[in-house]
Amino acid sequence: MNFKPLPGSASLLHRRRWLRRMGAVTASGLLGASTMSSLAVDSSYRALVVIHLNGGNDGNNTLIPTDGEYATYQEARQNLALPLRSLVQLSGSVDGRTFGVHPGLAPLAPLYAQRRLAFLANVGPLIEPATAEQVLSNRVRVPVFLGSHNDQTSMVQGWNPMEDNSGWAGRALERFPEVLRNPINAVTMDTNRTLVLGRQSPVSFLETGGGSRWGPADFAQPETAAAQAIMRMARWQFANDYEAEYARSFGNAVNDSVRFTRAFLAAGEPQADFGNDGIGPQLRTLASVLPALKSQGLRRQVFLVHWGGFDTHANQRGTGQGTQDFQLAQLARGLAAFDATNQRNGLGDDVLTLVISEFGRTTRPGSGGGSEHAWGSHWIAMGGQVRGGTVIGRFPDLRLGGPDDADGARNGRLVPVTSSDQVGASAMVWMGLPASEVYRVFPNLANFPTPVLQTLLT
């Protein structure tokens, strides 16, 4: 894509000025007095699970209009269009519109009907509100390197990779009240960590399935000689700065492993069907360990899960394991099992799950039965505190070259209506981020009239 930010759009000085200007905004004015009151006294357990679909999930084949606009969808999508009869109809209507989902997402339809799940329409990274006409005429600031996997991942999980590599959840957790903080606030399940990376605090690693062993040392048997040796090494101290930093990192990793091992020893095996492939094992791991972590007295945790291969330039449809069709079915099975287990464990209202991706894909198909990198896409929010059973935000106009298409060649690159920062801020305020800190964690939200989505969470 050839979108370019206007000169000076990302300057740190500009953002600092915005923060000073926005400092006069009161917490009650941003969120409402009742919300602030509930946050001030809340000491329960809350967890945010963010599932990032790697590669750019095609939202156009995730949530589909089933009313008169289906014909527009079918015309734009051509050979990628899902047959109307194959769609799983979502209950009710939204502002007079009706929607269906990809058949692979059928297990999510009951959660939508139970108002435990919502779709967030046309979400993506934004510096300020924008329209396709403004983008095409270069009259609005847009994120850098649109269409780049790495940069867009950094944008939806963090901020601007040219200025700050930390993530919005990591930055927010550092500004939580002390009573809500703990040594394993920020957790990743693989080597990806942007979302949960703070500016000063470490990130913890949770291994799928548990994993208590460090070579011959087994932290499930801490009295053994090998485990004792590792724990002694974790307490080493050095005068040299480099050696001291290595020792601190090593010690943190050992301590995290010990904490998670204790949680797994106390955990039960979920009974729901997560499946043994795809994202299932990761979500089974989380579902089993969350009650034990809560029982340890932890208050707030954010978990980052990266999964999938949604960069579907070719062969997007079909039964192959790399197709979107196959992967969405795996995702839905895992999500449904995860929510069912959380409810069974008494955590149904305590866990918020967001399903995101770095960008959506073009409405017009590419060559080879796939689609190309685009911008806005549809996300999913799940959990008891979600205002479910609806589509949040404005569903885009799918006409190629229409009012939401910012592609000069009319390929259907949709300009987001809802900023990924708005979704992140809403989640972190629910978790406990003081309203007075929102603009420091999400600087671009100073450009938005409604930084927190009141329609997302109860």
Image (tube, grey):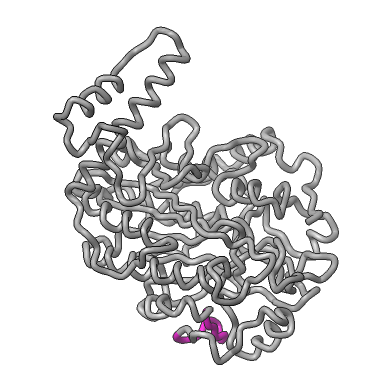
Quadrant of residue 385 within the rendered picture: bottom left
Q: Could you tell me residue 329's position as x and y percent? A: 47, 73
Q: Position of residue 238 (x, y in %)?
A: 37, 10
Q: In this rendered view, identify the residue nearer to me: 151 or 417.
A: 151
| Magenta stretch, residue numbers | 91-101
Q: Does the stretch in magenta take in 373?
A: no
| Residue ID at (70%, 68%) | 371
Magenta region includes residue 95: yes
Determine whether 136 is above or below 289 in the image: below
User: Which residue appears at 47% of the width and 56% of the height?
Assistant: 426
Q: Quadrant of the N terminus?
A: bottom right
Picture coordinates of residue 197 (x, y %)? 48, 39
User: In screen coordinates, is 15 left or right of 291?
Assistant: right
- Point 79% across, 54% down: residue: 3
Residue placed at 36% from the left, 67% from the top?
275
> Which of the 4 image quarters holds residue 91?
bottom left
Q: Position of residue 233 (x, y in %)?
A: 29, 20
* Residue 37 visible in the displayed image: no
- Camera-side residue: 110 or 227? 227
Foreground: 10 or 238?
238
